[in-house]
Image (cartoon, grey):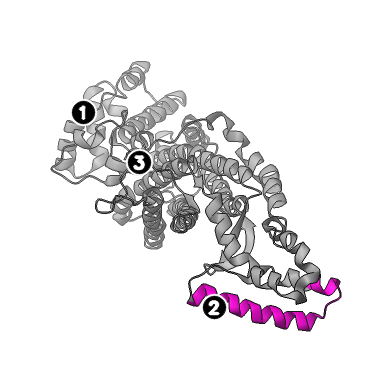
Amino acid sequence: MATGGDGDGREAACGHDSYRSPLASRYASPEMCFVFSDRYKFRTWRQLWLWLAEAEQTLGLPITDEQIQEMKSNLDNIDFKMAAEEEKQLRHDVMAHVHTFAHCCPKAAGIIHLGATSCYVGDNTDLIILRNAFDLLLPKLARVISRLADFAKERADLPTLGFTHFQPAQLTTVGKRCCLWIQDLCMDLQNLKRVRDDLRFRGVKGTTGTQASFLQLFEGDDQKVEQLDKMVTEKAGFKRAFIITGQTYTRKIDIEVLSVLAGLGASVHKICTDIRLLASLKELEEPFEKQQIGSSAMPYKRNPMRSERCCSLARHLMTLVMDPLQTASVQWFERTLDDSANRRMCLAEAFLTADTILNTLQNISEGLVVYPRVIERRIRQELPFMATENIIMAMVKAGGNRQDCHEKIRVLSHQAAAVVKQEGGDNDLIERIQADAYFSPVHSQLDHLLDPSSFTGRASQQVRRFLEEEVHPLLRPYESVMKVKAELCL
């Protein structure tokens, strides 16, 4: 994983002779890459060892202030080369870093990792990382919702042809369709926040979760062991710790985390698929930069590459939930190590992928372009057929016979449809109705009967009510970060 920095030249910095995940080298933000970096991980291990030592000292174990200060002074002094050499010999990553930390803290060497098991640093660090990664995603998702809410409000009254089965259906508005996207994302925001807030610390539990080693350290003082667990949990910024663990925290947590991220992936895939289809209809486009090239062969092309990227990565994000599902199902008794290598990949990849699609979707939502004339033309092609029921009702009100009117409309509609389908012409149903003396009682009403806004129902009111009652209250906690613009790495 990346070690952070400003992101410039990240790919070049790692060289071009070995594979590196495109999530880190091309797509994800520097801040998300840093949260999953080796530096952040192993620095957090050292912080956890320091918190443990501080709490043990407070509760009466013979740990000196000098030892504590030595650990504090070396939290960032990580010799990665030495740690790698140690791990190559020991085949144990935690003990390799215990030795590396002890090397620069000779006075504290004897009390580092005192009473702990590997999962004290491994699992607790993972939980800290998951929490902090959620804290990066939540405002990004809120900004996407905010940008789309602005778009929906602006286009709340613009009629557009609805589609069911990707076949023309009753009219809606551009803003109402956007609210379908927003509603899904609001559910994702609530789900991400819920899972983030429900995260609990593994805490200080020992090798099989019984806290036996700490009970021995404190000579059977049960209360001090509970205090130790509580103190370290609070130092790590968690409100609660698990009461029950095996060696690890339950891997059901990883299922919950990746499930809500997979749900976000599904929402983004649907949104960006809609944008791609609308781009093909030339009704709406994602931003297209002045020097951007759509095709190496066809210079006129304006491909929706951002939306395509979101769909591509969202598919990857949705599949990742299978990893923790299978991992949790095969954790024997108190723990097996076949979770480790898998979790190194799937947890990081899920958050880096979610980060990328949110950065990209924010960029899209900040520059959506609508083409009202194209939308209007497509409505004109389909609206005459949709208006036939209204015309029949108007004729009945003017004294006509409903059955006679229905038959005449049926015949004229089929004639107009033949022009559209067989001759490639425009829909001329209204012209045919205007030319038929039978319909003279409603000729003066046709413009009114064909007003697109009369076919959109309560779409405009629904948009305004939805934004006011559901969206804006949900976004209030994120108001301070709403002005941040999206930046694409590549």
Q: Is residue 454 magenta?
A: no
Work out whether mark 1 precedes mark 2 in sequence or the reverse, and give the earlier one: 1
For label 2, the residue is: 418
Work out whether mark 3 precedes mark 2 in sequence or the reverse, and give the earlier one: 3
Nearest the camera: 437 or 133? 437
Query: Which dot marks residue 28?
Result: 3
User: What secondary structure is found at the residue carrying circle 1?
Assistant: loop
| Residue in view at x 38 percent, y 59 percent | 319
| Residue in view at x 67 percent, y 58 percent | 452
Q: Amino acid at mark 2?
A: Ala
Is 128 positioned to the left or the right of 173 in the image? Answer: left
Question: Magenta region: which residues?
Answer: 393-422
Work out whether mark 3 precedes mark 1 in sequence or the reverse, and give the earlier one: 3
Q: CA distance from mark 3 to mark 2?
A: 52 Å
Q: Neighbour class for label 3 at 10 Å: few (<14), some, many (≥20)?
A: many
User: What secondary structure is found at the residue carrying circle 2?
Assistant: helix
Residue 69 versus residue 329 in the image, above or below: above
Q: Quadrant of residue 398?
A: bottom right
Q: Quadrant of the N terminus?
A: top left
Residue 431 in view (yes/no)? yes
Q: Quadrant of residue 164?
A: bottom right
Q: Is residue 415 magenta?
A: yes
Q: Neighbour class for label 1 at 10 Å: few (<14), some, many (≥20)?
A: few
From the image, state whether disc 1 or disc 2 is nearer to you: 2
Q: How many marks?
A: 3
For label 1, the residue is: 79
Q: Amino acid at mark 1?
A: Asp
